[in-house]
Amino acid sequence: MDKQWRNFTHSDHCVDFVLAYDKDDKPEHAEKRKEFEKNLEAVGLILEKEESQRIHFVKIHVPREVLCQYAEILKLRLPIRYDEPMSESSNVFYSTINKVLDCLNVRLDPQIFPPKQYKLTAEFNREKNYLFDVDSPDFFNEAVRITVASYILEREKFGNDDQDKGIHRLISEDVYKAAYPLHDGDLHESDSKRSLLLHHWAQISKWVKYQPIDDIKEYFGVKFALYFTWLGFYTHMLIPAALVGVLCLIYAATTVNSDALCDDICNLDIVMCPRCDKVCDYWKLSDGCMYSRIQHFVDNPATIFFAIFMSFWSILYLELWKRYSAEITHRWGLTGFDLEAEPPRPEYLIRLADAKKRKLNVITNLDEPAVSFWKVRLPSLILSFAVALMWVFIALSVVFGVVMYRMSLITSEVLYDDKTSYRIYVLPITAAIINLVCINILNIVYRKLATWLTEMELQRTQTEYDDSLALKIYMFQFVNYYSSIFYIAFLKGQFIGYPAKYNRVFGVRQEECNPGGCLMELTIQLAIIMVGNQALNAVIEIGVPVLLKIYTSARITVGIKKESTQEEVIISCNQWTEDYKLSDMQSLNLFSEYLEMVLQYGFVTIFVTAFPLAPLFALINNILEMRLDAKKFIKYYRRPVPQRVKDIGVWYPIMAIIGRISVVSNAFIIAFSSHFIPKLVYMMEVSPDGTDDGFLEFSLAYFDVHDFAQGTAPQNSTYDVSFCRYAEYRNPPNVTGGLVKYKRPLIYWHILAARLAFVVAYQNVVSFVVTAVEWTIPDVPRKLNDQIKREAYKTNETIIKHERERARLRPRRNKNRDSILSRETMYYDANGGFHSDLANTSSPQAAQHDVGNS
């Protein structure tokens, strides 16, 4: 696509923004467009219409004068003139890593993505234009031009009402079909930035290469670039976690055949008590032989080490990200960026247009409408909390429904006609799939509701709005995704009672864990929800934009009119027409990407004990996700409006909280869901030789079959037994010495005390390490801190230098002017006092000429 097809038809003005509307529109819509476009021209924008197609386009160009004016209003930091070359701070840790990775050919090709020279920036101010090279054609880059155009479009009026303001309102009323900046050329143009990013970044084959984050920032803006920077950093940090997880799995594979517990389950002739009332028969423990072998992969000493490793990994990951993001945001000129300097959302100003209460923004020194806490903030917060709480209970009720489904299947006689152990896997797999479907249905409904609630809160800036929405949705997603997993990890099989007195829910027996524990079932649940959700998201993220593009091209007529001339046919092939066919870049697009990754981070950290392969699956997913996201945004979505952000927002504190939760979660999973603590107590207090030989017999209690409650014993049993076994620590039926049968023995309380002691010790050790790491590793590297101070000093020095020069020249100009006026005054006095008439003359010669004429 030729460059002229991204410019005005009758001039060389570049197109900074495009508005699209239907030519067969309502008359009242045409009036609103006319008023809106008149106001746009009034503020200095240059417009040109393209009306050769069914969809008409308004092309917008922002002149340099308008760019200067609004760059100051928006407080944009732009490069300043500075003779001394500035060097970026280099972190020793990353420098070492970069030297190692250089050997692996992961660097970007400097011919395709030339390294960006670091430039010193300052907040733009027209009074200090000597600091900036405003006359340079590249001073205002595309991102700045788009930002300014979008800012004006969001705030110009189209009617008499104060709320008749902004392009978003016009689009919602269908006055315009779309408003968007243009992509930088066609996908097949070899010299366009869009094509370079598509072919050298957004390809799976480039997965081993670094990301061109500076070029991403120039094209998509800081907000998108910071997302891809964070995703790349997180993915790199997953590499050591994935390697350790694989090593733990290899250890499990080499020890599975020598594990005493697995051997006892497979070889001992132990008859277990029925899993349900009446219809279920006794069963052989050896039927679960394969299950116990598989469970060994997630319940062995290596997984304990892995849990501790991941706790420290999450701490290090968060601390290193803070340091790395400080360097990146400084490179992009966002050091010291304050949310109060961010302009208010147009929706915020529209809804508060009639507000009587005003307040002065101490950062921008502008008068802004103020939101009443008691009349607006508090009621909206109460409503949000109440609705969120209601949906949390709905999510929990879904989990309860899935649990009841599992319980009812257990009592189904048909399920147990097959004597094989396939049922051990079928039941948790089907339950997990049902749970995954319910999770995604609830997500769709709640997201719309959360968006409405956030609108009610009247958040001032887009960043505050995004953070509030993210917090609401994540809190619900946390319950929605993790509640079933928490149930299996901490509740299932813990309070079932014993065969003579089972604890029941609505008359139905609770689920029991297998003698090997619930850890394998927890792994199945984790794998299906985590991997299944990621696969589903990948299909949706790529499939939906592709289908929408096909649909738009086929169903929405943007083609040439039948009566078009050959010249109009050529005109119709342009960038704004091609971009109109793409999907609109909604504000929630990037939010969804963050949400998906942070949920994944929860799976990787909170439940890693039960699923050591979680980091590996996350690593593989993220390698694909990074390039697929890039391809999606470049190829199938319109170009977004660049946004300034200083960090990844509320997602960092959410991940920090997840890190704390993961410490507690893994401590409890190790203590209560694995055999680690019971085995330890057995070897220290019970085992005669200090080994775990005989642990299975120790962990299974005896039950006299004559003690079944009436109507619960197996009917038509094929077993002739007097005793059956169940997984509990209880006294046997023939206990002596004054002890009560089926009551908890002393060893049970020893095990419980050991479990609780382990949880406390684990958390204290990790907390100590967290404190040590936070104290040892500062959030901002020392070299970067020094560089920030030096840059501030140099900027002030440059300002003072130029101000002194201006002050020195100013008296000289004033002196020259006073000298001229003095000579003119004396001349006038000598020639008859024509002061009032001769005061406007520019020289004595002119005055003499006027005297002669008089």
Image (spheres, rainbow, N blue to C red):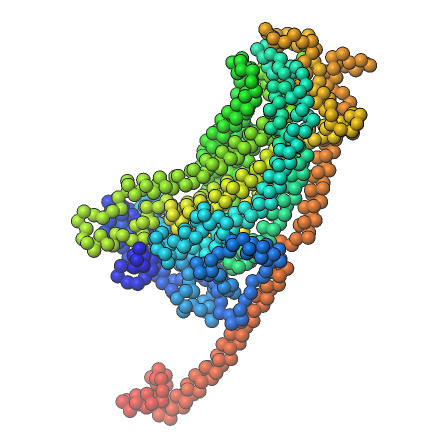
Find residue 139 and report its horizontal and vertical position in percent.
43, 65
Quadrant where the image shows the C terminus: bottom left
In this rendering, position of residue 445 left or right of residue 164: right
Q: In this view, does 833 lie above or below 637?
A: below
Find residue 455 and report its horizontal and vertical position in percent.
46, 42
- Picture mark count: 0
In this rendering, position of residue 771 left or right of residue 30: right
Q: Residue at x 35, y 55 (%)?
A: 189
Query: Residue 256 sits in which quadrant?
Result: top right
Q: Is residue 460 above or below residue 790?
A: above
Quadrant where the image shows the N terminus: bottom left
Query: Residue 190 sits in which quadrant?
Result: bottom left
- For the residue pair 59 and 847, the one nearer the viewer reads as 59
Find residue 403 and report its horizontal and vertical position in percent.
55, 23
- For the residue pair 331 and 588, the one nearer the viewer reads as 331
Can residue 339 be seen here? The reply is no
Find residue 583 and report its horizontal and vertical position in percent.
37, 44
- Extreme residue toward the right, this view: 737
Q: Is residue 847 above or below residue 742?
A: below
Q: Which residue is drawn at 59% across and 6% down?
A: 716
- Extreme residue toward the bottom, this view: 830
Q: Which residue is drawn at 30% across and 58% down?
A: 2
Q: Is residue 44 above or below residue 591?
A: below
Q: Which residue is drawn at 52% across and 26% down?
A: 429
Can residue 134 be seen here? The reply is yes
- For the residue pair 277 and 394, the one nearer the viewer reads as 277
